Amino acid sequence: MGDVLPFTDGELTAIRGDFPILTRTVRDGRPLVYLDSGATSHKPTPVLDAERAFYEQHNAAVHRGAHQLAEEATDDFEAARATVASFIGAPAHEVVFTKNATEALNLVAYAFSNAAPTDEPKDERFVLGPGDEILVTEMEHHANLVPWQELARRTGATLRWVPVDADGALDLSGLDDLLTERTKVFAFTHVSNVLGTVNPVTELAERAHAVGALVVVDACQSVPHLAVDVATLGADFIAFSGHKMYGPMGVGVLWGRAELLEVMPPFLTGGSMIELVTMERSTYAPAPQKFEAGVPNAAQAVGLAAAVRWIEAIGIERIHAHEASLVDRLQRSLAERPWVRVVGPAVGTPRGGAVAFVVDGVHAHDVGQVLDDAGVAVRVGHHCAWPLHRALAAAATTRASFAVHNTPADVDALLAALDRVPAIFGLDTHREAS
Amino acid sequence: MDLYQELILEHSKRPHHAGLREPFDAEVHHINPTCGDEVTLRVDVTGTGPDAVVTDISYEAQGCSISVASSSVLAEEVIGHPVSEALQTFEAMRAMLTSRGTVTGDETVIGDGVAFAGVSKYPARVKCALLGWTAFTDALARAGVDISSTSSPSPQGASS
Ligand SMILES: Cc1ncc(COP(=O)(O)O)c(C=O)c1O
């Protein structure tokens, strides 16, 4: 990606101009420096306009009713599906709209347990029981951990996990013992929301498939920041949230191979997902409708499609290169401060858009408060990855995460605020962070 | 920043009465799920009914400066005082902390607790400042003390 053109100042100004929220101030008139896009991104005007236009012009219950508005709303919703699908290199019917990534991951986890004890014909790949294993990793967000813990509890299967090494990469040395014929599913994140580590999805997927396991990838922190093509990725499912990629809250995506979606039992049931209903029983619509019970989040899906078009107009490679340069600037500057310890891969290793760090002797909550006082919004805590923080021996970290609208000046604002921390908390800045 | 009063920083660096001690009537472990702050706290109460006195509070706190300092101030203000008075101090602390900056706190009731007045302007930090105090009232209840004079603790917010 060395030949990707950096944004000109004019381009960056235009990009920033698309975000109304960047003009507001916080904490007594300070300009907002938003470095928390990993939690949720801001929304550019075209996304807000698309959502509003849907309500103003086409609003109707999708897939219900034969009036003109219902037709238009359905067309908009299905066009949104096609737009999002093509962005990740998938056919439209392999994209299921959910509420968020969490729901998408639960949808897959429930397909396993719902396939268990019925008298229906079922696909062996989704049948779990005692003796079967679920493999996850120690760096997962709770959204890609707790649903698998619960699935293990419901089915009697065993949960196992790949540990994280000192550099914040997956320790794959014991993978042959962890990934075996007993493994029915391997669920892991593409990019860590804390460490920024980019996992070797294709290699891991190959090894999982070699033992017959299905592969579920949490793509929340990859799809907004780097080109993801499911045709070559190797996963069987990926999950991501619209609100982290400039889209509205309330819409997420599950992509799954058509052949798998077809044999999976539904998660939520009710209207819009059925084929035929009698008092005794029902049959289901084909995927993706089978997984979209109830009136769907059409306005949000339309907004997400607008976000995808907005990203495509800029170019995901350019977004990635821009964010990588900011990550690099921040990482190098933090490395000059011996009282700060960055977690995750070393400078120069490919990373997602997040940099998390520890200030020795000062709790992340306190660091975040000093940054907030300067208008710099970061996230502090365990970032929904509590087991990972235990493995890092850090109760909490401070995380800066980038989006396309961030600038080198944003990085410098963070550093300037961070440099107030030692004085406020009486830190010896010559001592190395442990 | 008016949040980080010198008193808070001092208490957080050198927390008073820290460490877990015997004897005790009840031990509790409370966490703040949003940031992972934790406190293990023990109470030792002598006497019963209106004569009950908090003879000791011992604790191990791990967390931000606000939560550690607040456990320290709790121990400082409450050890050796009648339970009824301790509960009044708790109520006064809570009223100040949840006031969004409108209640400054009465030094004669909450002592060094007044240093936490600034916390009430930062809703995300109120839970940090209350962590030790809610652990304390929980420990009292487990020790069999009637704490019904205090309104129920504020519900714990969820975390992700
Ligand atoms: C890596 C990762 N996975 C899953 C999630 C869950 O996303 P959501 O809360 O939108 O479902 C997040 C974001 O919080 C995340 O960063």
Image: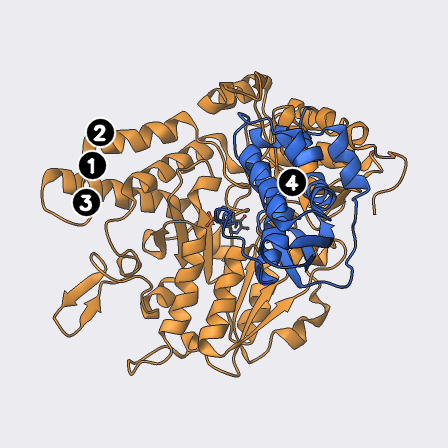
Chain colours: A orange, B blue
- In which image quadrant can residue A126 be found? bottom left
In front of the other: label 1 or label 4? 4
The residue that label 4 is drawn on is A399
The residue that label 2 is drawn on is A56
Q: Secondary structure at mark 4?
A: strand
Q: Are marks 1 and 2 on the same chain?
A: yes
In front of the other: label 4 or label 3? 4
Q: Secondary structure at mark 1?
A: loop
The residue that label 3 is drawn on is A61
Q: Nearer the viewer, residue A134 or A229?
A: A134
Left or right: residue A44 compared with residue A348: left
Residue at position x 35%, y 64% in the image: A261
Q: Chain of mark 1?
A: A
Asked if one can make out residue A90 in the rendered structure from this viewpoint, the answer is yes
Q: Earlier in the sequence, mark 1 or mark 4?
A: 1
Cα separation between marks 3 and 1: 7 Å
Q: Amino acid at mark 3?
A: Ala
Residue A341 drawn at (x, y percent): 78, 43
Q: Amino acid at mark 1?
A: Asn
List the single residue furthest toward the front. B51
The reply to whether callout 1 and callout 4 are in contact (CB within 8 Å) is no
Q: Amino acid at mark 4?
A: Arg
Cα separation between marks 1 and 4: 39 Å
Counting other residues with Cα less than 10 Å from the Cα at mark 1, is it few (<14), some (14-19), or many (20 or more)?
some
Q: Quadrant of the N terminus of chain B?
A: top right
Cα separation between marks 2 and 3: 14 Å
Cα separation between marks 4 and 3: 40 Å
- In which image quadrant can residue A255 be found? bottom left
In front of the other: label 2 or label 4? 4
Q: Earlier in the sequence, mark 4 or mark 3?
A: 3
